[in-house]
Image (cartoon, grey):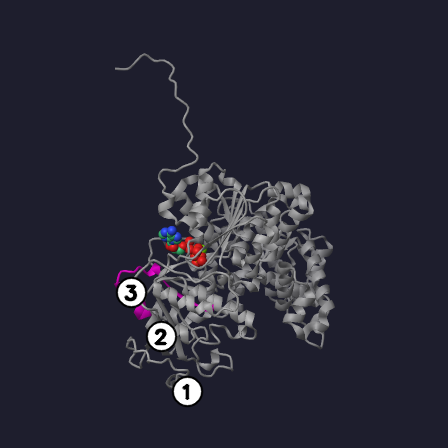
Amino acid sequence: MTEAAGPRVYPARKRVVHSNPARDLAADLNPQQAAAATHGDGPLLIIAGAGTGKTRTLVYRVAHLLDCGVRPERILLLTFTRRASQEMLSRAERLVGSTSRKVHGGTFHATAHRLLRRYGLAAGLAKDFTIMDQGDSADLMRLSRSQLGYATRSKRFPKKETLQYVYSRHINTGITIEDIVRDEYAQFVDYLEDFGKVFADYTDRKQQRNLVDYDDLLLFWALMLEASPELAAKISGMYDHLLVDEYQDTNVLQARILRGMCRTHANITVVGDDAQSIYSFRGANFRNILGFPKQFAGATIVTLEQNYRSTPQILEVTNTMISRATERFTKNLWTERAGGETPWLVAAQDEHQQTRFVVDRILELHEESIPLSEIAVLFRAGYMSADLEIELTNRKIPFEKWGGLKFLEAAHVKDVLAFLRILENPRDEVSWYRILLLLPGIGDATARSAIEAMASAAWESAAFGRYQPPPRARAAHTALVALLDGLRDDPNADQAKVTADIARVRTLYDSILRERYDRAEPRLSDLDQLQTIAAGYPDRAAFLSALALEPPQATQDLAGASRDDDDCLILSTAHSAKGKEWDAVFVIWAVDGWFPSARCLDNDEDTDEERRLMYVAMTRARNYLSVTYPLNAYSTRRGANYSIDQLSRFIDRGVRDRMERVALGSEQAVRPVEAPAVSPLLDLRALLRGKFG
Ligand code: ATP
Ligand code: MG
């Protein structure tokens, strides 16, 4: 029976903002972590070792702020990769629901890009600027270098990569060019003035061509905050809370940005571990994190020493290893976990035996029901996994590789992107030059004169069509003009536009590729992949910016498909493994000259950084850790200094004593050997084996 219809009155819904009954903070966090997560306003620094829950605390802090009624879009979460911020925000979502999706998360560079797109015009940047990656910047440096006549000097002038490095270091660290050159490139001190000239020309070129490099992204963000009160008010006014993970890998320019963002409030939380600072080549300095309390007066400092990640045996090894660092703030870690296996130190006869050991052991662990995705193999540099990749492929074990990925650096991919870039920005000289040199009949002189002709016509889009090429370049010129006209006029501006653009470019380019490069097939399939990725972007500009800013980290990112249901092993450089954890970790090539890299043994600072990198690698392990080293390597792949392989200097006696020594015999049985009662100073047998391997 229905009641007489009348107006219904709904009582006002109560808004619960301060507590979330579904969550018991005290159960999920220890008291120090909970204090940090629920910290009120004002600067907060969490400085603590690996696996102590820094990232977890940051996730809970985001959830706490949302609980307290802070609007999600007023929170900025800065992380080292886009993947990291996505992961953190989806964890926050499990705690507080979908509002966390509106939190602004990403890298410093991506955030800078977003702000420049929005405020760039007001800051004097022309619109539709193109972002250059590091390779592009070096290419533009080369143009400046040769335009100024340095390419033909009899005395060696710095290479484009050196110029780009010095420039970038100067911008990111604020160290003067003079000091950088004196410290790191003493052989070029005579050229000090010339560095300045090249950089001035490079800066002009960027402006004329409407290009923005990586360093500009950060620098412009900092300058907008420092040089214009109006812009500073607008930009810093966008956020009420800033949170930064992996703060040990930020540089002074990023610290300047954070200071600028905190003009009206000091709600900034940063977390990091000085012992894991591994990006000094990008201008990061582990001492920055120690300087935080000076930069943000009244900062609360939280330290954490309980490790939740690893077994006590793994902690013993990693604590011992990092205790050798010359300078370190964070303390040794302890755990409540009990039980566990002693980490293995495995000597293999050669690379192939190392590979077979790793694969066999992975399969063993997999048999013990550890999913492949919970196992990682880590190494110092991308090329070190080549043999392993072949073996995994042969044995049909699926894997994904992180870091050291050369897809976007591959010449053929850059070639295709160059076409899209000149459409997007007709003044992109670097891309023009690249394309012109690809074409039959066009050499350096013709390319330059074509570019000059376009420049003097103010890069107007029809200028290239009017250019009169020498006879042997005519056919190529006509073909390119036709292609560009077709692309410009392309009326189907639908979702698949970028993919269609690439397909069109390939009607000209694929045959060039076959002519110019060997092994055409895998390269062509790279381009197929590029087309697939492009389908995910609404337009050319978005696609190009995304590729420059967030270069795909893994092959799987490239395919665009999610491999969630595929269980696959992770291969990663130590750098790209930062912040992650796995049940089982293998660190391969623990050989002096490889890890530490031979290039980093000249001075103590670099060696210390390599040690921190080894620490990052080993502290990724929850339950199983194996460090392996081949006793012989083929000399073609090594520096001449290293004829016999020596175990990495970081696995010194104290560290070795805490590991289970495993020697793989010629029959490749995996068997622990009894450690000698006294650890030897020298392993004579290993040295001898190495001689005749
Ligand atoms: P890294 O320095 O390597 O980045 P981290 O300090 O950020 O490490 P997390 O990754 O946040 O550490 O945490 C390491 C592991 O310990 C994670 O699996 C996390 O869930 C777990 N953990 C952290 N704190 C706690 C806790 N209080 N209770 C249970 N598990 C915890
Ligand atoms: Mg972390």
Residue under label 2, please give it.
346
In the rendered image, residue 574, in percent from the top left (x then y), is placed at 45, 65
Labels 2 and 1: the sequence-earlier one: 2
User: Taking 137 as reference, is 620 left or right?
Assistant: left
Q: Judging from the image, what secondary structure is the residue with disc 3 in? A: helix
Q: Quadrant of ligand 2?
A: bottom left
Q: Amino acid at mark 2?
A: Val
Q: Classify the position of the C terminus by image quarter.
A: bottom left
**Which is nearer the N-term, disc 2 or disc 3?**
2
Distance, label 2 to label 1, CA atoms, is 19 Å
Could you tell me residue 266's position as x and y percent?
57, 45
Residue farthest top in this picture: 4
Task: Give neighbour class at mark 3: few <14, some 14-19, many 20+ (Cα, 10 Å).
Answer: some
Q: Quadrant of the N terminus?
A: top left
Instruction: Look at the image and give the residue range highlighted in magenta.
Output: 359-382
Residue assigned mark 1: 691
Of residues 343 and 346, the one drawn nearer to the viewer in this rendering: 343
Identify the residue at horizontal 62%, vertical 65% (top origin): 165
Under mark 1, the amino acid is Lys
For marks 3 and 1, the one nearer the N-term is 3
Does mark 2 have its CB less than 8 Å from ligand 1? Answer: no
Q: Which residue does the image show at 54% across and 65% down from the upper left?
A: 411
Residue position for label 3:
365
Residue beneath the point at 26% across and 63% down? 368
Q: Is residue 367 magenta?
A: yes
Circle 3: residue type = Leu
**Label 2 – label 3 distance at C-alpha:** 16 Å
